[in-house]
Amino acid sequence: MRKLLTSLCVATVLMTVGAFAQEQKNVTIAVSIPAADHGWTGGVVYHAERAKVALEKLHPGLKIVVKTSPDGASQANALEDLTTQGIDALVTLPHNSDELTDPIRQVKDKGVFVTVVDRALSDPSIQDLYVAGNNPELGRVAGQYLKDNLGTGDVVVIRGLPIVIDEERQKGFDEAIAGSNIKVLDKQFGNWSRDDAFRVMQDYLSKFPKIDAVWCQDDDMAVGVLEAIKQANRSDIKLVIGGAGMKEMIKKVADGDQLMPINVLYPPSMIATALELTVANFYDQIPVRGSYVLDATLVTKDNANEFYFPDSPF
Amino acid sequence: MSETTITVSETRRSWKDVDLRAVAPFVALAVLLAFGTIVNPNFIGIDNLLNVLTRSAFIAIIAVGATFVISAGGLDLSVGSMSAFVAGTMILFMNSGAVEGNLAMLATAMVFAMGVGALCGLANGLTTTIGRIEPFIVTLGTMGIFRALTIYLAEGGSIAMRAPDLRALYRPVYFGNIFGVPVPILVIIVVAVIAAFLLYRTSFGRHVIAVGSNEDVARYSGISVERVRTLTYIIQGLCVAIAVLVYVPRLGAATPTTGLLWELQAITAVVIGGTALRGGVGRVWGTVCGAVILEVVGNIMVLSDLVSEYLIGAVQGAIIIVAMLVQRSLSRRR
């Protein structure tokens, strides 16, 4: 009898330990992202760290390792280092698709769950989950707003860098205003830099006596645009449309700025979306495989507070 | 512009003796101005020209410093990152509120920025001379260091001036004017006049050229090569700081893209201006002209509808090469 009782006790203890271990399920997730080299990537780093803290608190056995890399080659090295540490999942925003497709394939071949963020790989069969913003939509929403609210007018465009993201945004914009009375006076590259956008805008202001609106697809560039308009003392410009959701610009929208009544979202917090979904795959048994494309949400005065992160660097 | 050419060569007796190499960049600029006017009449408008000259201030001022470094046989690739670093620390200093009173704060911040710039230059200079390492490698290293420090300080975002009244007080340093001449243009002129005096009229200037032409001969004639070289890097650091003093009030922020590729533009301006990359020849006014040429080329590209936005880089490159060819053919004709 006594023997039976003892073994029962042992069994209970063992079961409890087993249950506890189940609770304490250990998962290691590596996050490989570009180093903060401009405002948007700075936001990505901020939101990755923020999500790491929140998720690790929620799941005691979860370990998230965030690693930033300044360029594609060093990101490839970082991926190797992270994999040798033994990881269950990789959440990565690759510097560029061509260079990093193979390194990520090698990670995948080790049986790791792969989540790709924002920039799709050359071979999409590698990724288990793809989380991205919607670039054509970012252009389309801005174009549609101009068409609906300005109706007729002359618009100047400041583009980013000549890469796929920029092409998609531009194409979306062009399609939205096609057939309307919105006329694009000029398009130039501003390299997603405040200084270059300032320079281009100054030149636009010298070149065109009347400009109704500016579309510059990115809030960093909008800073330079606004300063150039302020200096020129021009009152013909009715609208400046940026994008991506930088906190200073979201603040302007929330405060009801005349020149900048809206913003189009392309949030760096998408890295947090990707992390949440990846974690859900391991802890909540929720099917997450597939593509998750975020909307290019139109931010207006009414919903601006939802997208305002005062502590974020971006 | 042509006035300055004459002042440079006033010691010579007649136009026949004028050094065509010194005049060449100004001829190239004149050709560009004519070209721009044909392409778009708005180009020659006074507002546009003042915009362009004002914008060229950063590169012009930095390139004046680079003229010293390069004519002494050195090279500084770190100036772009250094600008970002000096701008970042200066703004952080202003945000710290260490000094009472806006005007006093601004003055202290300016002195602070000059100090940071001089120290950065000193670090480059000492590592090159005492460490006996190629300046290309040293400044390539510090280029990465300054850039990374800026990004670290900014936590990946931007460093912006917080106090709006301080910003308002500082703003005229970029946007203001004295008798219709924008302040940054006056700064270029003052910096260039001082630099020209230093390089052409003092023994230090002659030492710089001597060190750049032949290091061994300079050493045998009793010149402390290390001291002269280090001083040129400090001058470069100070010039970067002055450029930053004009840069910060424009957008009131330093970002990780601040000063990106400025080092290449500064070196290009110096070379267009007629300074030899191998050292031994320095032309301050040519350098200023070179910086203006670079900015004018960019301006013409935006004002014209000649090429698609994808091809602008190619046309800019071609114009710079043609400008250099014009210059070389002029100097060969002596």
Image (spheres, grey):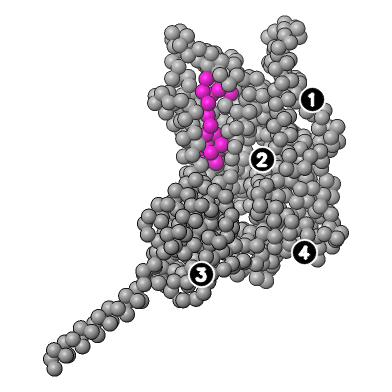
Q: CA distance from mark 1 to mark 3?
A: 61 Å
Q: Nearer the viewer, mark 1 or mark 4?
A: 4
* Chain under disc 1: B
Residue span colored magenta: B67-86
Which residue is under mark 2? B174
Question: Residue B258: x, y in percent?
Answer: 58, 43
Label 2 with label 1: CB-CB less than 8 Å: no
Which residue is under mark 1? B31
Which residue is under mark 4? A144
Above or below, B115 against A271 in this view is above
Q: Are marks 3 and 4 on the same chain?
A: yes
Label 1 with label 3: CB-CB less than 8 Å: no
Which residue is under mark 3? A277
Question: Residue A259: x, y in percent?
Answer: 74, 58
Q: Residue at x 75, y 43 (%)?
A: B309
User: Is residue A239 something that shows in the picture?
Assistant: no
Q: CA distance from mark 1 to mark 4?
A: 44 Å
Q: Residue furthest left?
A: A2
Q: Are there few (<14), some (14-19), or many (20+) residues within 10 Å of tag 3?
A: some
Give the mark nearer the N terminus: 2 vs 1: 1
* Chain under disc 4: A
Q: Are there few (<14), some (14-19), or many (20+) residues within 10 Å of tag 2?
A: many
Q: Amino acid at mark 4?
A: Gln
Q: Amino acid at mark 3?
A: Leu
Q: Are marks 2 and 1 on the same chain?
A: yes
Observer-nearest of A78 and A185: A78
Q: CA distance from mark 2 to mark 3?
A: 48 Å
Observer-nearest of B174 and B53: B53
